Amino acid sequence: MMFSSATRLVLASGSSYRRTLLDRLGVQYTVCPADIDETPLPGELPVAIAKRLALEKARAVAFRFPNHLIIGSDQVATIDGTTTLGKPLTHARAVAQLLELSGKRADFHTAVCLFNSSTDVARSAVVSTAVEFRPLSPAAIEAYLQTDGPYDCTGSARIESAGIMLVRRVASDDPSALIGLPLIALQDLLASEGVHLV
């Protein structure tokens, strides 16, 4: 079926970035932030963390929305494939994170899950984005943080804003994934549930 207002979608996230992205699709949806423990499990790798948390976020709100399609998403970044970079939340941690990223490649793994609360079927995808950072001086980092204040962004850089100046190269199958919600993958998941946006 084509998308209609009768299709009930829920975004299990309070992220303004994800709402802005989902708005691009021109769909109606309800926002219900999921409150879950996002602590990685012992030995859990970044891709697995992102995929598990996207599913857990969707499932966490499902009891409130029977007969809905619930969207959960999560992003985990890593430099070495095992250690994760999270949201810095403070200026000092953002400075430390950007110094660590200076001149290096980081992989951002963004998971999206579409959970059908009426059938208990979960469909998911993970989109990875490779980001090569330029060498960053302490002065450049300070100037960037004062401009953008990306303390709620994984990796301490808002790529859709002034953070683009910090990177040399971005490679991904889905440019929206780096911002926090892979829209191309989400459309494929919706189509698997019989919801076609175009």
Image (cartoon, rainbow, N blue to C red):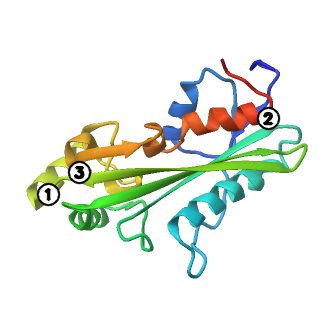
Q: Residues within 10 Å of mark 3 (few under 14, many from 20)?
A: many
What kind of residue is marked 1? Pro
Vertical placement of 14 versus 93: above or below? above
- The Cα atoms of the two marked residues, 3 and 2, are separated by 41 Å
- The Cα atoms of the two marked residues, 2 and 1, are separated by 44 Å
Q: Residue at x 43, y 45 (%)?
A: 178
- The Cα atoms of the two marked residues, 1 and 3, are separated by 16 Å
Label 2: which residue?
A: 193
Q: Earlier in the sequence, mark 1 or mark 3?
A: 1
Farthest residue in the bottom direction? 42
Q: Quadrant of residue 8?
A: top right
Q: Residue at x 31, y 50 (%)?
A: 157
Label 1: which residue?
A: 135
**Is mark 3 in CB contact (under 8 Å) with mark 2?**
no
Q: Earlier in the sequence, mark 2 or mark 1?
A: 1
Task: Say whether residue 156 is left or right of residue 16.
Answer: left
**Is mark 1 in CB contact (under 8 Å) with mark 3?**
no
Disc 3 is placed on an element classified as helix
Task: Say whether residue 61 is left or right of residue 160.
Answer: right
Q: Residues within 10 Å of mark 1 (few under 14, many from 20)?
A: some
Vertical placement of 86 versus 169: above or below? below
The label shown at residue 145 is: 3
